[in-house]
Amino acid sequence: MNETKQLKKDADRVLKETSRTFYIPISRLSTELQEAVGAAYLAMRAIDEIEDHEELAKDVKSRLLRETALLLRGTFDTAAYGALIAPYADLLPEVTIRLGDWVDYCPEGIRSKVLDSTAEMAEGMAAWAERDWLVETEADLDEYTYYVAGLVGVMLSDVWEWKAGIVTDKEQAIGFGRGLQAVNILRNQGEDAERGVGYFPPGWTTEDMFAYARANLAQADAYLASIPKKTTIHQFCNIPLALAHGTLDALSRGKEKLSRPEVLKIVGGAMLKG
């Protein structure tokens, strides 16, 4: 098997291992879009694993993220990245260790845009690590959710325009990512509290966060409506958005999460509508 085929096989495997939610819609895109979105997801997941790591000190996280961002903004040097993470290689997952492979996997025509968004995300994550993830206002929450998820929407919009000529509204694209993240915050608030982390601004109730999630999902709905129906791109966006709406509905009824049959029903419905 040649190197290109092996890299695609590895990317597919790691993608499946790291995101069951996105693996299905990515696998239904055209080949070049699969490579672009798959590489972007893996690159962003690589830095996310640094930010979320339970055993790395926050100053280590900040340094790794800032130096990785510098590499992403230049001509990415895989050997330099390997040297940077070498002291922590035993702690980091494959998706993070192989960031250089995901850069190589990304189609050249969109690579610089993907790396710019990933670098901006890494810089934002570093700043939040330095602040100890302390959300004090709604503006802070907006900033945090922009860096960890809104930038995913920005990156996807760049990819859609590059390959399909589909132009979307940037604020709606940010709302798409932000809305998915707000649902995750609601779903994981108990688990986050156990880790001593919280993303609710002081004084906010669960209902306030529900309102925040709904407002951003409304932006996400407008984003989806701007993408031509019956395309794999529309289907790609519709699946996680439908799951986010379904999860929010389940949480509002007091359930912890969607059941597996509910997930399959929502994904099936989203595929038909896409």
Image (spheres, helix red, strand yellow):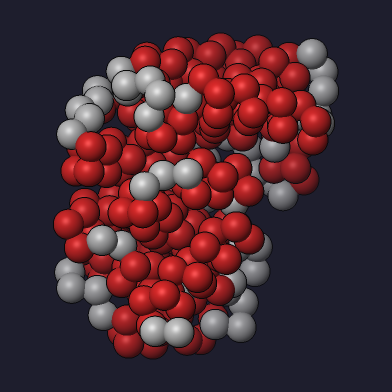
Q: Residue 213's spot in the image, x, y percent?
A: 54, 20
Q: Residue at x 79, y 35 (%)?
A: 260
Task: Indicate the quadrant where residue 257 lies.
Answer: top right
Q: Residue 137's spot in the image, x, y percent?
A: 46, 25
Against 191, residue 204 (above or below) is above
- In the visual, does 59 lie left or right of 268? left
Q: Residue 19's spot in the image, x, y percent?
A: 59, 51
- In the visual, does 125 lie left or right of 132? left
Q: Residue at x 70, y 37 (%)?
A: 188
Determine if residue 129 is in view.
no
Q: Residue at x 17, y 57 (%)?
A: 109
Against 73, residue 100 (above or below) is below
Task: Indicate the quadrant where residue 184 lies.
Answer: top right
Task: Indicate the quadrant where residue 147 lies.
Answer: top left
Q: Residue 224's spot in the image, x, y percent?
A: 39, 21
Nearer the observer, 200 or 215: 215
Nearer the observer, 245 or 63: 245
Q: Residue at x 59, y 72 (%)?
A: 93
In the rendered view of the protein, which quadrant contains the N terminus? bottom left
Against 118, residue 137 (above or below) is above
- In the visual, does 137 lie left or right of 70? right
Nearer the observer, 170 or 141: 170
